[in-house]
Image (spheres, grey):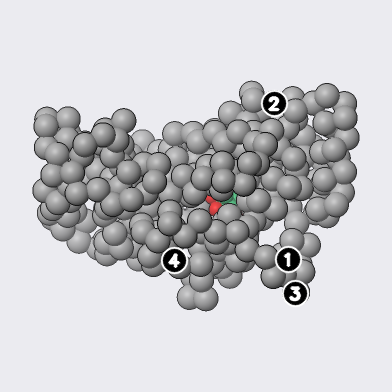
Amino acid sequence: MQIFTNPAEMAAQCRQWHRDGDDIALVPTMGYYHAGHESLMDWGRQQAKRLVVSLFVNPTQFGPAEDLAAYPRDFERDSAIAASHGADALFAPAPEDMYAPDHATWVEAPALAAGLCGKSRPIHFRGVCTVVLKLLAITGADVAVFGQKDWQQQAIIRRMVRDLNLPVRIDARPTARAEDGLALSSRNVYMTESERAQAPHIRKGLLLARDMAAAGERDGEKLRQAVLAYWSGQMPLGKIDYLSMVHPESIEPLARIEDRALLACAVQLGKSRLIDNILLAE
Ligand code: PAF
């Protein structure tokens, strides 16, 4: 596996692969790998001749009060993991390699970024879209792989790709979970023992809503209230940022399940902001 930090050198290598007739899969990451990242790499490995993993803690998607400085990092371990999952290249630029001091161009999809995580993280998705577009431009990837845990993120990226006619396929892969159901996240390491013990109830609450929906409940507010009541009993340390039912593609709020519906949440457990979601109707 080759390690690139310079965007021009990474781009030159990708152009060469394309000239050789090799297609390219990109797995964009911010590092501190867990089994979820590994499953995205494994999927990417199967989709194209060449696999590029990018490792970049993108400063523009963190708000001023967020955890950019504290975000967990372990370059040696991450590069060994990427290599062991068959990456041909690890692209690990420094922030100054990606953003000129007078960087002035942003990409955003405000209609999809207003709700859910976008409400409490107003600049987040602008930073995500901009960096993902840059990574796609640098690598010329034929397919890019994301996780369904960040459902809103993959919906926004799909929309950006469609709206800007980007020649790339977006694959979104199922959320990897701990045995007790907690969605794997690099931010799980911030939790204390008692917070971690309560965290699996996030998923259990969402499953309760799915069972109610499967039994015929269509009213979004009734589903929400049932989950909130469950959480307040089982997860007293959790502070609910949001629990919302939305259309999985447009991310528009839904009052009732008519067609497709996603229930998505963000819960603060101590220093960890944990997100998860579940499809109530597909
Ligand atoms: O999901 C992430 O890890 C990040 O938002 C991404 C897609 C790598 C962009 O920085």
Crowd around label 3: few <14 · some 14–19 · many ≥20 (10 Å): few
Q: Is residue 199 above or below residue 23?
A: below
Q: Which residue is mark 4?
A: 121
Task: Compare marks 4 and 1 and give the one earlier in the sequence.
Answer: 1
Q: Is residue 92 visible?
A: yes
Q: Residues within 10 Å of mark 1 (few under 14, many from 20)?
A: some
N-terminal of the two: label 4 or label 2? 2
Residue 49: mark in rendering: none
Label for residue 99?
Answer: 1
Residue at image coords 58%, 61%? 127
> Mark 3 highlights which residue?
102
The x and y percentages for residue 14 are 82, 38
Chain-order first, disc 3 or disc 4: 3
Q: Which residue is mark 2?
A: 48
Residue 113 vs 50, above or below: the answer is: below
Marks 4 and 2, how far apart in space?
Answer: 34 Å
| The quadrant where residue 175 appears | top left
Residue 158 point in image, percent of width and height: 53, 42
- Rendering coords of residue 176 (x, y %): 44, 37
